[in-house]
Amino acid sequence: MLRDAALVCGKDLRIELRSKIGLNQVAPFAATVLLLFGLALGPNRQALQPAAAALFWIAVLLSVVLAVQRSFAVESADSARDGLRLSGLDPAGIFLGKGAAIVAQLLALEALLTVGVALLFGAQLSGGLVLLGTCVTASIGLAAVGVVYGVLSSGARVKETLLPLLLLPVAAPVLLGATKAWDEALAGTPGQAGVWLSLLAVFAVAYVAVGSVAFGPLLEGA
Amino acid sequence: MRGDRAVRALGVAALAGMIATVWLGLFVTPNAVGYADGTVRLLYIHPPLAWVMFIAYGMATLSSLLYLWPRTRHARFDRLAGASAEVGVVFTGLTLVSGSIWGRTTWGVYWAWDPLLTTTALLFVLYLGYLAMRNVPGDPDTVARRSAIAGLVAFLDVPIVFFAVSWWSLHQGPTIDLATRHSYVHGSMAWTLLLGFVSFTLTYVWLMVHRYRLAALRARESDEGLESALADRWAEALQ
Amino acid sequence: MSGYIEVGYVIVLGSLATYATSLVGRERAARRRLPSTPADGDAAAAVRPDAAPSAGELP
């Protein structure tokens, strides 16, 4: 299973590196979101700085939708999905592989956005370990639900509008936990972030588990 | 049809219960001390609405599980899940409305981000998404299986959302704290509250029966539509 | 203040009543669209048992 995962992950990342969609479209999209927030709430930093964590994670959440759509768009080209099904790869492995590829992209994006919020909103970066830990656990959770709902909506003709509607409400606890954890870290009290990090960890574990099991049957039906 | 008389009786009972609850709730029971003027009357409809919401989603999840379990796989469970989710969404919307009015009369604002209402709002959009997904056209078995899994995935989120939102609002804000209200609920109020719960539950069951029937009829319709189309093709081929 | 309560009751009960009526209406329309006694073949009969469950059938 892990070998299959590595295979799929490698494939997805290679496609990404070659097409550079993440670089050319998703990252600028996220940056645009930050700018728009700045336009809407600024120019006075008073509204922006306390909201930095929240705006950061909303931008991440919106970008996850794009990343997931992209992840499954590559499969629908040239009936690649049938190829995936018939390849004999362990479905749980496919799930983990796709998820891991999305996590990698998310982490890169989050690094970029961190610079963005520090620059644009004046966020004082402190509590780096908590910031990083949050990014990792949140990204894993988001990628997991993303892949599940991605395969679920991939067969549908209305998938562009269906995926956000399905994904965002389920991801609400991640938004909540990640924002609060970052708030604590940015405010200089990283110790208080414990409860939020555990929430994120529970979410990640739960949805990685569910996704591994559910991906197979969902792929059959897609 | 045999069941019709039972369902009609159910409907009558539900309607009678609702009317009685409204009459008692609005006109007969007294204003309670400690509540803003008249607010206690919402007690007879808001908690029952929330209660039905939980039953409805629980039922949908249970049905989804039964559908996925190989031994009990049957289209009826998929239809039950869909019916229950739809009725659940209706009741969730109404829970939000009644909760919002409660907030308006108690705290002066229509929305105060308290944990219970916020969780309910998230459940509302969560299951709206579920219903949207059910409506996506496709092979019925595929849709059913997809919906069942989606239902379970959504339901998994419910406790996570609840805890997250509770921690989130620990430091601030008012809560519709029903626990402390117990001391004020006695006499005719307690009976009306009980009647409220019973009536709303009966209404839920009645709505469920009809929504389920509608789903079954539609399924039959599409099956027979398919058959008549096949029959037409046969006729053409044989000419 | 108590005006809000009455409005609340009206909205809640009105919505439930509207939903109930629309449900029954749609059910009747669906029933009317189907042939009342499917005289043709096993296929239709096989579909039948599922179609109109009695209240007792529900858990």
Image (tube, coloured by chain):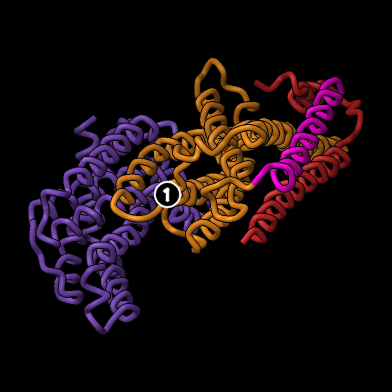
Chain colours: A purple, B orange, C red
Q: Which residue occupies 76% across, 50% down?
A: C18
Three-letter residue code for mark 1: Thr
Query: Is residue A22 rendered to the left or right of residue B23?
Result: left
Q: Which residue occupies 66% across, 31% down?
A: B191
Q: Position of residue A6 (x, y in %)?
A: 19, 39
Residue C11 on the magenta span? no
Q: Which residue occupies 34% across, 41% down?
A: B163
Q: In terms of depth relative to the viewer, which is nearer, B209 or A143?
A: B209
Any part of residue B79 in sight: no
Q: Position of residue C56 (x, y in %)?
A: 74, 19
Dividing the picture into quadrants, the one containing residue C25 is top right
Q: Chain of mark 1?
A: B
Residue B6 on the magenta span? yes
Dividing the picture into quadrants, the one containing residue B215 is top right
Query: Is residue A176 rendered to the left or right of residue A129?
Result: right
Tell me the element at label 1: loop
Q: Position of residue C10 (x, y in %)?
A: 72, 54
Q: Is residue A155 above or below residue B200?
A: below
Q: In terms of depth relative to the viewer, which is nearer, B76 or A50?
A: A50
Q: Is residue B26 above or below residue B79?
A: below
Residue extending furthest top? Answer: B71
Residue located beneath label 1 in the image? B175
Any part of residue B225 in sight: yes
For the image shown, how many numbered marks are present on the structure?
Answer: 1
- The residues colored magenta run B1-30
Q: Residues within 10 Å of mark 1 (few under 14, many from 20)?
A: some
Say which quadrant the N terminus of chain A sits in: top left
User: Magenta span: helix, strand or loop, mainly?
Assistant: helix
Q: Position of residue A100 (x, y in %)?
A: 23, 45
